[in-house]
Image (cartoon, grey):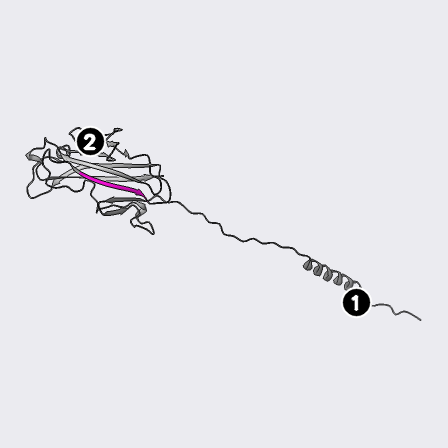
Amino acid sequence: MRRLARSGWQRQLTLVAPVAAAVAGAVTISALGAFSATVTQNGTFAGGSIVLKENGSSTNCYSAGVSSGAIVGGNSYACATIDAFGAPTGQLPGGTPNTQTLTFTNVGSSNASSFTLTPGSCSASAGGTFYGGDSSAAFCGKVDVTIGNGASVCYFPAQSSACPAPSSSDTLTGLGSGGSIAIGAGMNAGASDTVVIVTELDPSAAGSDMGLEATQGFTWTLNQ
């Protein structure tokens, strides 16, 4: 009995079928034997903050411009509600010294390595209905001043003891020309420093100094 010869397409089917079956088996085996393990997580990175709070009497000012929340003005705030000298009026030559106590606190989350005061230059102008003709420099040179911690350290004039009584040796003129002053040894987060500023109209003040008012800027800075 003669065998019928296979056509070309029959031979191709005979060869392809086993290969397809083998591939299908390999896919099935691989899917059944796959292992996997997964861990998911977040990464967090937080910056610290150095924020200076100033308290004078019952008024507070913050370098951040707000007592909490988003910092405004680049963490530099011009405080108009606290006067560095306490805004004394009616001062007489050699009269009772005026005392202003300020408390500074680092309310941020990071320690500050330095705390400095940079006084501006002093100027004078008419402060009342009647006033003398002394110049700004002359009148500022007759306002005596000391700055300390109110206890054992004096920052201006600099000495490792309590501040002396105000005198013509240390005036607003000298304060404005002396550059930055280190206050304490930095300020840790949550820590505070007390600064006491004492001013007095020098006994040498004359009629030309009547009714004048001295103005001087103060910049308090915490540094990392």
| Quadrant that contains the C terminus | top left
Q: Amino acid at mark 2?
A: Gly
Q: Kindly state the secondary structure of the residue where label 2 is placed.
A: helix
Q: Give the magenta-colored segment's residue range.
A: 99-106
Indicate yes or no whether the magenta region holds residue 97.
no
* Residue 3, percent from left and from top: 90, 69
* Residue 100, percent from left and from top: 20, 40
State the residue at coordinates (79%, 67%): 9
In this rendered view, identify the residue nearer to me: 139 or 99.
99
As drawn, the label of residue 184 is none
In this rendered view, identify the residue nearer to me: 148 or 11.
148
Residue occupying the far front of the picture: 151
| Mark closest to the chain's N terminus, 2 or 1 | 1
From what the image shows, is residue 13 above or below residue 203?
Answer: below
Q: Which residue is mark 1?
A: 9
As drawn, the label of residue 174 is 2
